[in-house]
Every structure is written in structure tokens, then in C-alpha cells.
Image: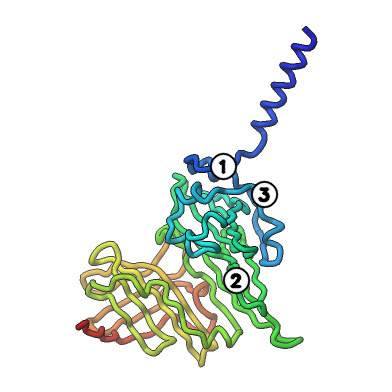
Amino acid sequence: MHKTTLAILSLLLLVTACKDKKGGLSGDKPVTAKELLAVYPAINLPYTVADTNINRLKDTTTIPYKAIQQFIPDSILEKLEGGSKAKAKTRIHPLGRIEKDNGNYLLTTFTYNKHTSLAAFFFDKKNEFKAALELLPARHNNDYTYTVGINREPTFTVNKERFASANQLLYTRTGYAYIDASADFLTVINETNDEQKKVNEIYNPIDTMARKNKFSGDYVEDKKNFIAVRDGRNAQEYLFFIHFEKNNGACTGELKGEFTVAANGKAVYKQNGDPCVIDFAFTNTRITVKEQGSCGNHRGIRCLFNDSYDKKKEKKKK
């Protein structure tokens, strides 16, 4: 009888230990979003991670490629280290989970051939995937060091730094925040003193999107001062991307968002969680921009989103 009691107690202890152990994912078995979120340890903010310590911080749990592929589109996964073509050799690990009122941010590492990248995935309160953001690249110029700082909002600030001399630190700081109204990560901080970045070609994130609607197109002053406007979900809704450099590049601004154009050709950029408010006025050949709210998160302190740009003529296809 005594041996039977000990055996039952041992079995109960084993079952309890298994329940306490953090769940994992394995094989090709389909998983739910709750099961995926459960393998990510909660992290406290503020939080910092660097390219030099990312491998020491990541959790030992492995996420099968097919498990994360259930929720994250291939078009996003293939841009991360290893990509979909090397999915069999790509090691995916949960770094941490940030829980907020509007949903969860999942910090995830992708390792392939000893190179590791870091991405953030956002899932809303219904556990539906909404957006992704690469925070640390796996392969970069060895002259630079990369760190990511995450504050309590959270804003994800990517810092890229290098020493040009013993007394001169060159830096680029780019901050991103998830905006519910846009269902995407948008740039909220953009500052640099690194001339190398300033001379590089400017990346337009909406360049390849459709431009069939009335006001869609490129409105240009020069290569470093422009507004790209692209088709939205209907004929009145538009996506836009602004980039400008004033005072010989001493003050820059950049913003991606969306607006609805009224019958009079006017529109307003205004998003929840962003104090920035910008008025847009269209004619058939021109766009005028006027900053009405505090847009300091998107530009330098000595310049505003106030300007006019001429619409670039589209080349006719043969």
C-alpha cells in the first residue's frame, strides 16, 4: 500500500511539473495563435538588445517554420534571414513578448549560417497578425554597431553607430511605432549626423503600389524632396509617403500614412496615437502641404511639413 501511494504521488508531481513547464511547438502540427504566443516569455519595458548580445538573450525554444508560417505571410518571412527558400535550415527563436492594451508584440530571431536577424510581429487583441518590422539586420557593414531600444509606449528605436574618429560618433536613429489606424509600423523618429546615409538613395516604401486614381502619382521638387501618393482601398482613400531635406540636409523629415480626399480636393492626415496633423490640398498638377499639429517625431526641430510639390508627368507606356 505504501509503495502504491508513493507511485501515485510521484505521478502527480510529474504531471504538475509538465503543466508548469512552458509549452513548446514541434513538427508540422497546426498550432493556434494562443499556443504561438505562449512560447514567448514576457519582457519588461524599457528593453534594449544589441547585435552583439542577441544570441545570448534569445530563448532556447525553437519555433518550427511551418508553425510561424501559419500566421506570417511568406512575402514577409522571405525578407528575413534565411528566407522561405532556406526554411529547413533557418532557426527561429522567441526573444520576448510585449503585451499592450491593443495587442501583443512578438520579438523573434531568425538564424541562418550563423547570422541572426531580429523582427517584431504585432498581433491584435483577437490574436490576428497585423504587421511586421525588421529591427536588427543579420548582415551589415562591420564598421557599424546596431542596438534597439524599446520604451514603454512602445517605440522601437534602431540605433546605428560608428566612430569616424576618436572624438566623433556618427549615428542614425530611426524610431518606429505601430499605429492602429494604419495597421502598420510607421516611422516616428528619423535623425542622423552620418553623411554616408544622406548621400544614399532614399527608399520609398510605397513606390511599387498602384497609382491609377485621380490624385495618385509622384509630386516632386527634387530627388530628396517629394511626396509619393498611391491608391488606397477605394477612389477616395490614398496612401502617401513624404520625404524632405531642408537647409542643405541639416533638417530632414519623413512620414508614411494614409488620408481620404474630399470632393474639394482636400485631405487631412490624423492618426490615433500620433499628435501630428497635416493638411493636404490637391489640384490636377500640384499638392500643397501644411503642418497643423505637432509633427516633431517625424522631422527635425528646425523644419516643418510646409511646402508645395508639382506632379511628375507619367511616362506613357508603348
Estimate the x, y position of residue 138 in percent, counting from the top left: 60, 67
Q: Earlier in the sequence, mark 1 or mark 2?
A: 1
The image's mark for residue 60 is 3
- Image marks 1 and 2: residues in contact by CB distance under 8 Å: no
Asked whether, in this view, residue 81 is left or right of residue 305, the answer is right
Left or right for 164, reference 238: right
Q: Are marks 3 and 2 in contact (CB under 8 Å)?
A: no
Mark 1: amino acid: Ser
Relative to 71, say whether 231 is above or below: below
Please name the residue shown 57% across and 42% down the image: 25
CA–CA distance in space, label 1 to label 2: 28 Å
Residue type, mark 3 in image: Thr
The residue under the point 66% across, 77% down is 142
Mark 2: give few (<14), some (14-19) or many (20+) Cα within 10 Å: few
Q: Which residue is mark 2?
A: 139
- Image: 128 above or below 238: above
Instruction: Characterize the local packing of mark 1: few (<14), some (14-19) or many (20 or more) Cα atoms within 10 angstroms.
Output: some
Query: SS class of the residue under badge 2?
Result: loop
Q: Residue at x 31, y 68 (%)?
A: 238
Q: Which tag, 3 or 1, sits closer to the chain's start?
A: 1
Q: Closer to the observer: label 3 or label 1?
A: 1
Which residue corresponds to mark 1?
26
Q: Is 160 drawn above or below residue 124 in the view shown?
A: below
- State the CA–CA distance, disc 3 to disc 1: 13 Å
**SS at badge 1:** loop
Q: Quadrant of residue 317?
A: bottom left
Disc 2 marks a residue whose amino acid type is Arg
Q: In this rendered view, identify the residue nearer to me: 305 or 227.
A: 227
> Which residue occupies the foreground of this view, 283 or 90?
90
Q: Position of residue 170 (x, y in %)?
A: 65, 83
